[in-house]
Image (cartoon, rainbow, N blue to C red):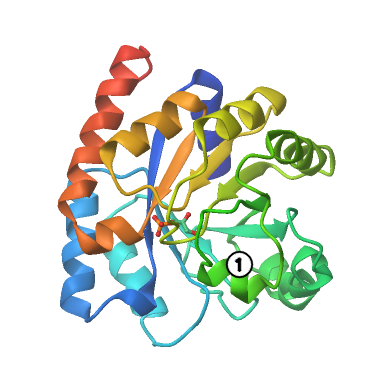
Amino acid sequence: KKIINRLNSSATEGKKSFALLIDPDKVQNLLELQRIIHTAIENKVDYFMVGGSLILSDFLGPCISHIKAQTEIPVVLFPGNNQYIDLQADAILYLSLISGRNADLLIGQHVLSAPILKRSKIEVWPTGYMLVDGGNKTSVSYMSNTNPIPHDKYDIAMSTAIAGELLGQQLIYMDAGSGAEYMISDRMIASVKRAIDIPLIVGGGINTVQKAKSAWKSGADVIVVGNAIEKNPELLIEITEAKTLLNEQLNVH
Ligand code: 1GP
């Protein structure tokens, strides 16, 4: 069964999921990487996302093979550009930066990577990627050379997400950027979620268990946490516990 179908079924049931984002460039050494992966497997995160804005190290391949050697938990690539491909991964977020007006990130990078992806067995997930202002200038807003959607422009966010869905995107990913000063507001998450019928992924600046819970409760189907767990791996355990509790309350298992 395709992983995206599983993701879709969970979202339809209202079941909340948690993706741990690992940026191989931010990991100090392989031992630290192994420790985070081990904790994530023990706590049964739903997805590993592997990605970043740059490729500074040669940890991408080892990171994915290390995860794949130990667990069936899907590994999803979250690429910063068309070089960010490793076919050991189970799936790739094929991101169209629909909040921006940079043609290269709407179609250009895709043209460069399409033949290799088409020939591979990797699941390609068409994803409408929306950057939302998170207070500070994050790597992704600088690297993408686009303006994020203002934090309080709910209608723009909603209309953008609907346009993404109508254009055939299968997921919407709203991101305030890694290490955002503030996460996307509950109100914006809720207005986007109400407007679309495809799963909603939310990330950027989720650095406490309270923020994780409020993103889920506002309508995120999957939350992505990276930066805060790099700093405090214990948070991974707290967030998984909160997710299990919430899914029990929602009566979805
Ligand atoms: C960034 O959404 C991800 O693209 C995760 O952000 O690193 O702030 O958790 P953080």
Q: Which residue bears the numbered disc 1?
A: 141
* Left or right: where 249 falls relative to 174: left
Estimate the x, y position of residue 77 in percent, counting from the top left.
51, 63
The residue shown at (43%, 42%) is 223
* Any part of residue 164 in sight: yes
The residue shown at (69%, 40%) is 153
Question: Splitting the image into four quadrants, where does ligand 1 fall?
Answer: bottom left
* Any part of residue 220 in sight: no
* Location of residue 151 (image quadrant): top right
Q: Quadrant of the C terminus?
A: top left
Q: In this view, does 104 lie above or below 150?
A: below
Q: What residue type is labelled 1?
A: Ser
The residue shown at (64%, 27%) is 191
* Left or right: where 141 falls relative to 126: left
Q: In this view, does 116 lie above or below 160?
A: below
Q: Nearer the viewer, residue 101 or 115?
A: 101
Estimate the x, y position of residue 190 in percent, counting from the top left.
58, 26
Q: Tag count in the figure? A: 1
Estimate the x, y position of residue 252 in percent, counting from the top left.
38, 17
The residue shown at (58%, 61%) is 122
Q: In this view, does 67 lie above or below 168?
A: below
* Left or right: where 179 falls relative to 81: left
Estimate the x, y position of residue 40 in percent, counting from the top left.
24, 52
Label 1 residue SS: helix
**Label 1 crowd bin: few (<14), some (14–19), many (20+), radius 10 Å:** many
